[in-house]
Amino acid sequence: MKLIITILTIFLLSFNISWTAQRNDSTKTENSDSSYIEKSNQFIKLILSKKFDDAFEFFDTTMKKAFPIEKFQSTWNTIESQVGKLEKIVKKETIIYNEKKVVIFTTKFEKMYLDIRIVYSDSLKIGGFFLAPNYDFNEYKTPPYANIKTFDEEQVTFGKKGWELKGILTIPKKTEENKSEIFPVVILVHGSGPHDMDESIGPNKPFKDLAWGLATKRIAVFRYNKRTNEHPAKILEKLTNFTLYDETIEDAKEAVKKMISMSDIDPFRVYVLGHSLGGMAIPRIADGDKLIAGYIIMAGNARPLQELLPEQYQYIFGLDGKITDEEQEQLDSIKAQVDRVNDSSLTKDTPINLLPLSTPANYWLDIRNYQPAVKAKEITSRMLILQGERDYQVTTKDFEIWKQELAGKEKVEFKLYPKLNHIFMEGKGKSRPEEYTNASHIPEYVIDDIVKFILRKY
């Protein structure tokens, strides 16, 4: 998950472009750059002044359709409620990406540093507006249980032609006594949102915790940038036909093939771990695949995705003990959108702005009737289902459905952790979105439970 808001957002606003773009050409004039920066300054000032109508006019026609003013306003308000007010802009720069001028403001909010990225179309209008954590300021600290001297990390590129992804294989160091040792491997599959390989959110990197923790205990881990992170522009081109298979499943299956081909990996001990949306996708990843030794589902929803959305909004809005008129309007809107997803009249041509999360109809048509726990009955490999009791995004209601549907099935284990939230980090009392901005780590006892599952003999 990227920003907290992208836990609830699959596509548009939350696309985090891989900014490997080149710096401005030396032929670009300072005056040209300064005009873009000044326009961006005006845009941000209007947002901070809550003049959303005026700020909305900075968008080009395509952006206005993709990101209607109501969603623009509610998204910004939600971000402020989760990471606090914008306190200052610490850095300004411009780059060229895909022949478009991009202004990047590195900003300090009350609870974390964010990069605000504003993409300009040829008309000097804003054609893209993105927010993402700035990892130079949100420094990651090594978990106390990880020993970086005990493993190596190897860059690995894999995937279908045209959709190649960058990944890292974290692999234990071989001993002098056993230089031919091969290792079990866990492949990590992300939740919703355009995640990097660490599934970064604020200063937290759950997938890096898992990789370093498991590798310290002699289990290899493969993590990779999600397709929506690595190829956002190409995905936008085919967005109307985009499905869960394109977003997650195909790359997970390709990762399995890649790991089986690696000389240091035991091809009979390849495991797939899915978190959140990735956990929901596990039964489809497993479909027809006899090569995987086992599956680990961390906070995977057992119900159709759209059913969770009103609950999530209701929970967040109700944390302060009251629901304002504006919040009630948003609740009514999301409920109407969910009803539209469930309606038999939904077609591929239903406008995106009428559907939840600005996500196209084809995506919902693919998953709206998908029951992950029911589908999981078909899995013949071992399974471990993990759930945080304080998780408000995927709740214990889903955990109980997993248990109910898989009751009596051999080689299935369940673990419920009283202190953990959605990203498997500890807290007290009701879980709140701002928790994700507090630097923490997945506890070692979760790592240990995964290790025991992988090493257990049946």
Image (cartoon, rainbow, N blue to C red):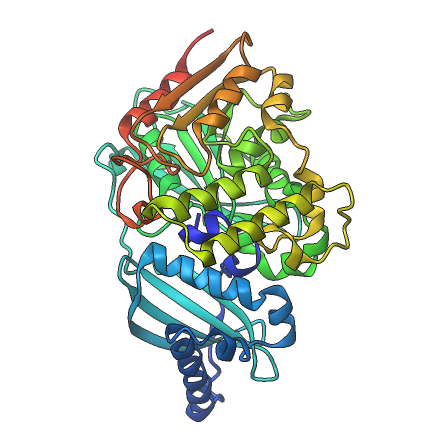
Front residue of 106/180: it is 106
Front residue of 322/29: it is 322
On the image, the x and y values in percent for residue 332 come to 56, 50
> Would you say residue 246 is visible in this rendering?
yes
Q: Count the marks: how many? A: 0
Task: Give the answer, above or below, for where 154 lies relative to 360.
Answer: above
Front residue of 431/207: it is 431
Task: Give the answer, above or below, for where 49 lies relative to 454.
Answer: below
On the image, the x and y values in percent for residue 283 come to 61, 27
Could you tell whether 243 is left or right of 3 in the image?
Answer: right
On the image, the x and y values in percent for residue 41 come to 40, 81
Task: Give the answer, above or below, for where 329 lies relative to 207.
Answer: below
Task: Give the answer, above or below, for where 270 lies relative to 20.
Answer: above
Could you tell whether 237 is left or right of 21 in the image?
Answer: right
Residue drawn at 32 percent across, 68 percent down:
107
Could you tell whether 385 is left or right of 302 in the image?
Answer: left
On the image, the x and y values in percent for residue 125 come to 56, 81
Residue drawn at 64 percent across, 42 percent down:
244
Front residue of 276/18: it is 276
Snapshot quadrant of residue 449: top left
> Would you say residue 133 is visible in this rendering?
no
Residue drawn at 30 percent across, 50 percent down:
437
Residue drawn at 62 percent across, 64 percent down:
66
Residue at far left of view: 144
